[in-house]
Image: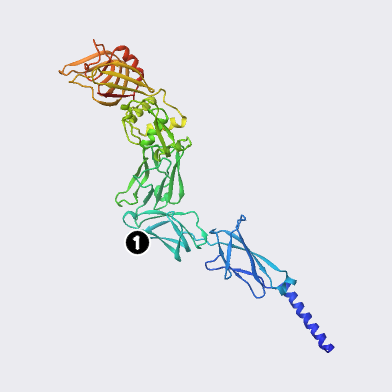
């Protein structure tokens, strides 16, 4: 080659080398990150920049979210929360011919935030006969209604039908809704949306609805069609009966009352009084009211029996299927959702007449007598009915493990001659005594009854079969069990035949021995 040509070539090559070095240090093309319609992002690779060799996506706390790259788009392989700030690290492998100067790889980091859709309103006015629709400020693709799993929409939309026609029973209502703009996003906590008829008067939507059962540990939610301040001013609803707790303003339209401590008592009628009348959702517009009412369910008969057995008031024991915490709240819940377990007779030689009275989960004489005894032990009115006061005391005694003071006593009387009274205590018949029952004109009624009055001495009055009246003072060791019929002492020339006017008469010594074992609630069976 001619020397001049060789020199020119060297100069040109040197200039090209200088240009490459200049671009490498000042303006070499790098990977870029752009938004994508439904993917997380799109990686753009200008000419000569190379190819993507790795991508890492992490949350603000370092949590890694795996992704796949398809046609330059990043697709999450796990759910990512909406509104999450992400750091995306893209590693690009450069062309081999440039890597000797620029390095084999280039790492670039980008910061992006996943899209969020927000509700335009949570209190809707809906005309009767129209479909309830929920509006968002941007299109959503995945929606969850009423706690159901998320469902993808055929096309992203800002307006989501709730699947409810605002008529009939759905004239007003509420629904929990959660939605996200992308199918790969994790649904957020649901938001409550309420709707009301398009009426000029203030309305209230309650949960639970008025008249529906109220759980002991439940809360009351009142959602008004207008802001609470506009409907009630600064006043708050009055709860009756008053229990510890307070009203909280969840949002401008919604008040909630959450009870403290043990919650609402079982079997209690709960009412809420408002300072101004409102239309209760679902009721005619002309029936505005200031009072809302609910009832707390009473405990189940089976759970009542379980607790009575556990505290020693039944001739049966009860063994729980699984251990449960002994707290008032846990016991309240168990009263309505009965735990599993099994009953067994406490004594091997229980009288057949007593066993025949028992039925688990159903009201029976054994249970009624046990309730009466429990009521008497706890200074409650004795009626054999497990009302709110009985349940409160039962739960308190269960938590405190306060058991019945004595064992289990039972009396059975044979009406066939020779008539007798038998006293069965804790598995043993400790006394059998001749006794007298009613004459044919005033027989002692067959059946099983619970003692309802227990006095050491008193006057017995009544009417004889011939219409005359009797008045016998100083009768000892009286236990009334059926109307005017009682077990008591009475002096007779003999015992073992019908001689009374319905009572069970015993010799003084036998009556004195029986009386301590026949407190209120003790069962007395009259049989042939």
Q: Quadrant of the C terminus?
A: top left
Of 419 and 215, which appears nearest the observer? 419
What residue did someone put label 1 on? 130
Q: Is residue 74 left or right of residue 309?
A: right
Residue 165 pos. (x, y %): 35, 59
Q: Examine the rendering and report whether any part of residue 395 can be seen.
A: yes
Examine the image and state in which quarter residue 292 appears: top left
Q: Is residue 499 left or right of residue 233?
A: left
Point out the residue furthest to the top here. 493
Q: How many numbered marks, from 0 up?
A: 1
> How many C-alpha atoms fall within 10 Å of the one at disc 1: few (<14), some, or many (≥20)?
few
Examine the image and state in which quarter residue 350 appears: top left
Q: Residue at x 78, y 83 (%)?
A: 12
Of 90 and 114, which appears nearest the observer? 90
SS assignment at label 1: loop
Q: Examine the rendering and report whether any part of residue 393 can be seen.
A: no
Above/below status of 39 relative to 302: below
Q: Is residue 471 left or right of residue 76?
A: left
Above/below status of 173 relative to 342: below
Residue 85 pos. (x, y %): 59, 59
Q: Quadrant of the N terminus?
A: bottom right
Residue 163 pos. (x, y %): 38, 59
Point out the residue furthest to the right here. 3
Point out the residue furthest to the front here. 348
Residue 69 pos. (x, y %): 58, 67
Above/below status of 500 relative to 47: above
Above/below status of 489 relative to 246: above
Q: Is residue 118 left or right of residue 480?
A: right
Describe the colour scheme in one phrase. Answer: rainbow
Of 255 and 130, which appears nearest the observer? 130
């Amino acid at each position: 080659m001619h020397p001049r040509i060789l020199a020119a070539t060297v100069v040109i090559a040197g200039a090209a080398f200088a240009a490459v070095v200049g671009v490498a240090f000042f303006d070499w093309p790098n990977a870029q990150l752009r938004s994508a319609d439904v993917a997380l992002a799109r990686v753009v690779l200008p000419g000569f920049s190379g190819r993507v060799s790795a991508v890492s996506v992490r949350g603000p706390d370092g949590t890694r979210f795996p992704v796949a790259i398809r046609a330059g788009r990043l697709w999450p392989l796990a759910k990512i929360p909406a509104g999450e700030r992400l750091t995306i690290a893209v590693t690009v492998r450069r062309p081999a011919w440039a890597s000797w100067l620029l390095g084999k790889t280039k790492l670039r980091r980008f910061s992006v935030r996943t899209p969020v859709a927000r509700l335009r309103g949570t209190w809707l006015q809906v005309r009767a006969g129209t479909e309830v629709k929920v509006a968002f400020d941007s299109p959503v693709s995945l929606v969850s209604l009423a706690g159901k799993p998320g469902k993808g929409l055929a096309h992203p939309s800002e307006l989501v039908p709730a699947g409810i026609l605002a008529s009939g029973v759905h004239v007003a209502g509420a629904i929990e809704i959660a939605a996200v703009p992308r199918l790969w996003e994790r649904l957020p906590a649901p938001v409550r949306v309420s709707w009301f008829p398009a009426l000029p008067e203030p309305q209230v939507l309650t949960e639970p609805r008025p008249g529906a059962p109220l759980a002991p540990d439940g809360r009351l939610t009142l959602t008004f069609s207008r802001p609470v301040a506009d409907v009630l001013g600064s006043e708050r609803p009055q709860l009756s009966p008053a229990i510890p707790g307070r009203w909280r303003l969840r949002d401008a339209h919604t008040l909630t009352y959450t009870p403290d401590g043990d919650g609402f008592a079982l079997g209690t009628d709960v009412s809420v009084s408002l300072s101004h009348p409102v239309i209760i959702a679902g009721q005619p517009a002309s029936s505005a009211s200031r009072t809302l009412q609910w009832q707390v369910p009473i405990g189940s008969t089976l759970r009542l029996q379980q607790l009575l057995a556990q505290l020693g008031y039944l001739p049966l024991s009860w063994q729980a299927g699984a251990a449960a915490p002994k707290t008032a709240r846990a016991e309240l819940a168990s009263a309505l959702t009965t735990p599993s377990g099994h009953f067994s007779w406490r004594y091997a030689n229980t009288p057949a007449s007593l066993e025949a009275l028992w039925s688990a989960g159903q009201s029976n004489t054994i249970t009624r007598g046990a309730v009466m005894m429990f009521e008497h032990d706890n200074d409650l009115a004795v009626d054999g009915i497990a009302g709110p006061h009985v349940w409160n005391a039962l739960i308190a005694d269960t938590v405190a493990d306060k058991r019945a003071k004595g064992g289990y006593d039972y009396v059975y009387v044979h009406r066939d001659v020779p008539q007798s009274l038998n006293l069965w205590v804790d598995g043993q018949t400790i006394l059998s005594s001749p006794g007298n029952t009613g004459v044919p004109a005033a027989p002692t009624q067959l059946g099983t009854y619970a003692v309802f009055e227990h006095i050491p001495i008193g006057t017995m009055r009544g009417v004889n079969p011939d219409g005359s009246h009797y008045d016998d003072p100083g009768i000892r060791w009286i236990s009334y069990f059926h109307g005017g019929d009682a077990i008591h002492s009475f002096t007779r020339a003999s015992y073992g035949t019908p001689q009374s006017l319905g009572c069970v008469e015993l010799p003084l010594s036998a009556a004195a021995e029986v009386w301590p074992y026949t407190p209120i609630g003790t069962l007395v069976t009259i049989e042939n």
